[in-house]
Image: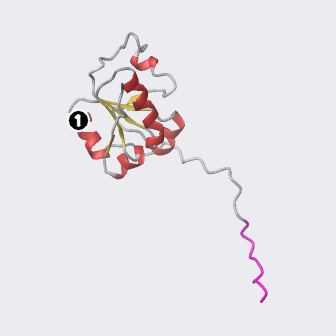
């Protein structure tokens, strides 16, 4: 039976990393380019954990290695943290608030290298509307 890996405040996660935990960033290349990167973070494809961690039945990284997962939000890091716990990693957590919380806490982060993508959603008309009639 595995437990759900805990969320950690960004400052607590950074302290864990300073103590030797492996920090993995599972955001897409576009997400990192648009919002910035965490220096020293190991990049991992959330859909191909075997590439970094090895197959579940033959892990490349010791199962007792502390691991901190960061994404754009806990919705992205949570499933990765849970997948690692299911593989047998015993010291996994993820950052509450994701990369934005990390950056807002004043922790090391690079500036974006490109402007964040704008929404392709239609915008509301800017033409004035007629006042309602009584």
**Pick the front one: 28 or 96:** 96
Instruction: Report the magenta stretch's main SS.
Output: loop
| Magenta region, residue range | 125-134
Query: Is residue 112 shown above or below 88?
Result: below
Task: Residue 114: give x, y in percent of width and height.
Answer: 53, 44
Determine the image quadrant of residue 61: top left
Task: Residue 91: give x, y in percent of width and height.
Answer: 28, 29
Give me the residue at 78% from left, 81% from top. 130
Query: Is residue 57 shown above or below 108?
Result: above
Determine the image quadrant of residue 129: bottom right
Q: Is residue 123 left or right of residue 10?
A: right
Quadrant for the N terminus, please: top left
Which residue, given by chain and number where applicable, does mark 1 sit on?
18
Determine the image quadrant of residue 86: top left
Q: Is residue 22 left or right of residue 25?
A: left
Q: Residue furthest left?
A: 19
Query: Is residue 58 shown above or below 127?
Result: above
Quadrant for the C terminus, please: bottom right
Query: Is residue 40 shown above or below 96?
Result: above
């Amino acid at each position: 039976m595995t437990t759900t890996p805990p969320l950690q405040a960004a400052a607590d996660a950074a302290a864990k990393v300073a103590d030797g935990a492996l920090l993995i960033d599972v955001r897409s290349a576009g997400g990192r380019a648009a919002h910035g990167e965490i220096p020293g973070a190991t990049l991992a494809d959330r859909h191909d954990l075997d590439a970094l961690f090895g197959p579940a039945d033959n892990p490349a990284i010791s199962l007792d290695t502390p691991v901190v997962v960061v994404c754009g939000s806990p919705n992205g890091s949570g499933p990765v943290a849970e997948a690692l716990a299911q593989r047998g990693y015993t010291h996994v957590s993820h950052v509450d608030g994701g990369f934005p919380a990390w950056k807002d806490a004043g922790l090391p982060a690079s500036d974006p290298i490109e402007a964040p993508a704008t929404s392709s959603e239609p915008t509301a008309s800017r033409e004035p509307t007629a006042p309602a009639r009584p």
